[in-house]
Image: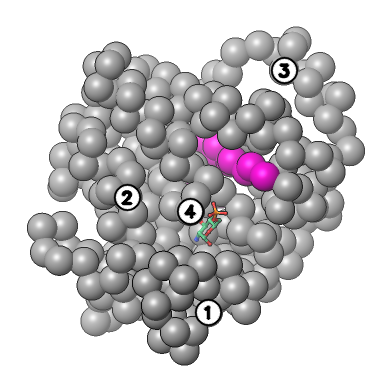
Amino acid sequence: MNVIIRDTYEEMSRYAAGIIASLVRQKPDCVLGLATGSTPIGTYRELVRMHKEEDLDFSQVKTFNLDEYLGVGMDLGKPYNMDQSYARFMHEELFKHINIKKENIHIPDGLTKNPEEFCKAYEEEIRKAGGIDLQLLGIGRDGHWAFNEPGSSLASRTRVEVLTKQTLDDNYESFYKKAGIPRDQMPHFAITMGIGTILEARNILMLANGRRKASVVAKALEGPVTSQITASAIQLFKGGVTVVLDREAASELKNVEHYIHREKLLGTFSFNSINE
Ligand code: GLP
């Protein structure tokens, strides 16, 4: 596992965007797995800058997003049914600023009438696209990847999941404080890729920043593999793993010196292109 520590959020974001950009340049028709949340915003901004200033071309790139709230969604072109939809987030933060084709964007449909069928079809779409080359991930404060809340099977597939109290508390800010949506009307369910689905990607790029993530980052990377911290499944990953942290998020790791030493010896990042 490559653990890269940078002093600031901006440096973390630039490093992460550099990894994504070099994959897009190396394999213009690559398949990216994308994440939402505040963590990847800086990375997306840097990708947008590279698209505008350095001709980074997304015209053949396909994307699959990790998750979406159930009952929330956005049909591109139609009004958003809720500002907090992950589809809207992706459109505003990334897609509308780059030359990605609409038909190459895949986001779980929170407005589906048949979630079970939808989840099966989503898995099938990923398979048909040839699998995910690089999956971008954040980490929730309860250690989740996407919406694989504590107790999710580490072999789980795309499905509907119930959000934890911790996640609802974290969402309160954007739903209630920003939009006045009371807690009982906030989404309590989400469609999420499973941990088993994520582990099939060829490369993982996980990001975390800030003091509030330090303890859960240390548990996920250096603690036992457990369904209570689903991001700890990173330790089981077969492909290329890079974790990029800012100084604060790395502050509770035990092996920091080793990670820094390792980066010095190994230098540049290379992709795992083997599909096992
Ligand atoms: C949500 C998303 C996760 C994300 C997490 C952290 O739960 N489903 O994919 O990693 O939020 O969000 P933030 O980056 O804002 O801390």
Distance from the alpha carbon under mark 3 to that under mark 1: 38 Å
107 and 181: which is toward the camera? 181
Q: Residue 162: which disc? A: 1
Secondary element type, mark 4: loop
Q: Looking at mark 4, is its residue's CB closer than 8 Å to ligand 1?
A: yes
Q: Residues within 10 Å of mark 4 (few under 14, many from 20)?
A: some
Residue 215 screen position, x and y as percent: 79, 52
Q: Is residue 267 above or below residue 1?
A: above
Q: Residue 245: which disc? A: none
Q: Is residue 221 left or right of residue 173?
A: right
The amino acid on which the numbered mark 4 sits, given as a three-letter code, is Gly
Q: Is residue 214 left or right of residue 180?
A: right
Q: Is residue 103 left or right of residue 162?
A: left
Q: Quadrant of residue 145?
A: bottom right
The amino acid on which the numbered mark 3 sits, given as a three-letter code, is Glu
Q: What residue does disc 4 label?
A: 37
227 and 125: which is toward the camera? 227
Segment tinted magenta in the rendering: 199-210
For the point 58% across and 18% down, which residue is it? 269
Distance from the alpha carbon under mark 3 to that under mark 4: 27 Å
Q: Check the picture and name the quadrant holding the N terminus.
A: top right
Q: What residue does disc 3 label?
A: 263
Distance from the alpha carbon under mark 4 to that under mark 2: 10 Å
- Kindly report which numbered mark, 2 or 3, lies closer to the viewer in this rendering: 2
Distance from the alpha carbon under mark 1 to that under mark 4: 18 Å
- Kindly report which numbered mark, 1 or 4, lies closer to the viewer in this rendering: 4
Secondary element type, mark 2: helix
